[in-house]
Amino acid sequence: MTIVLHGPAYSTYARTARLALEEKGAAYELREVDILTGAGQQPAHLARQPFGKVPALDHDGFALFETFAIVRYLDEVLPGPKLQPEDARRRARMTQICGVLDSYGYGAMVGKVFWQAAIVPMQGGTPDQAALAEGLAMSGKVLGVLEGLAAEGGEFLCGGGQVSLADLYLAPIIEYFAMTEPGRGALAGHPRIGGWWQRMAQRPSVVKTRPQLG
């Protein structure tokens, strides 16, 4: 089977799909699409993803986009450990966490905090303090929600001793968030998520897909 994932290594969403592939032990090819330089708006990529986003998947001629659809599909068609809980309630919790991250977490934690606190200075600019404050406020709310939703005393977010898509969604976002001083400060106030990240950061799939910035 040929699996091709289109998207840049630095993308959190492309990384979530890569984490799923790594956890399943599947061979795949990552074809870089540098969305920061406009490659996502080129005709070849728009044919794969009409909104110009990443990632996009090609699996033996079956084309698919939208990260949650991709990772659920990969989990269901590939051999290897299951990434979705069998228990309906834990599976619903997984879906809920992914939805929270899509709707509220990514934009605040990556789009505002990481971008303003890390990328803007890296590019020689001055952070927009209003955008940073807004991102931190929402990030704190998201972290509080995740702290409450995470399985008590469990190694993974949805419990059951099993890594799930929720873990693979959150890990790339937290990695960037924790690269910033404000992000680390926010994480320090949420010990369940902070401890989860300390464990996840050492997981082989996370180490292998870690983006090289700068």
Image (cartoon, helix red, strand yellow):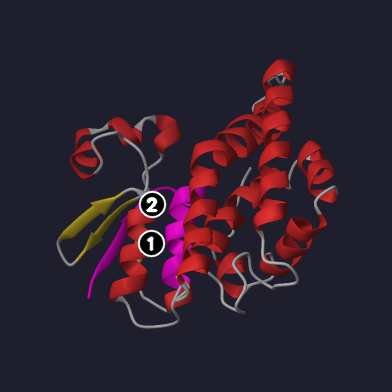
Secondary element at tag 2: helix
Quadrant (top left, top right, bottom left, bottom right) of the N terminus: bottom left
- Up the image or down, 138 lies above or below 1; here it is above
- Up the image or down, 43 lies above or below 7; here it is above
Say few, some or many: other residues with alpha carbon within 10 Å of mark 2 (under 14 / 14 to 19 / 20 or more).
many
The reply, left or right, for residue 174 in relation to residue 93 is right
Pointer 2 residue = 67
Identify the residue at image location x=60%, y=78%.
160
Pointer 1 residue = 71
Residue 130 percent location from the top left of the image: 71, 16
| Magenta region, residue range | 1-22
The reply, left or right, for residue 30 in relation to residue 93 is left
Residue 191 percent location from the top left of the image: 82, 57
Identify the residue at image location x=73%, y=45%.
144
* Numbered tag placed on residue 113 in the rendering: none
Residue 120 percent location from the top left of the image: 66, 26
Front-most of residues 200 and 32: 200
- Up the image or down, 149 lies above or below 40; here it is below
Quadrant (top left, top right, bottom left, bottom right) of the C terminus: top right
Front-most of residues 170 and 143: 143
The reply, left or right, for residue 66 in relation to residue 119 is left
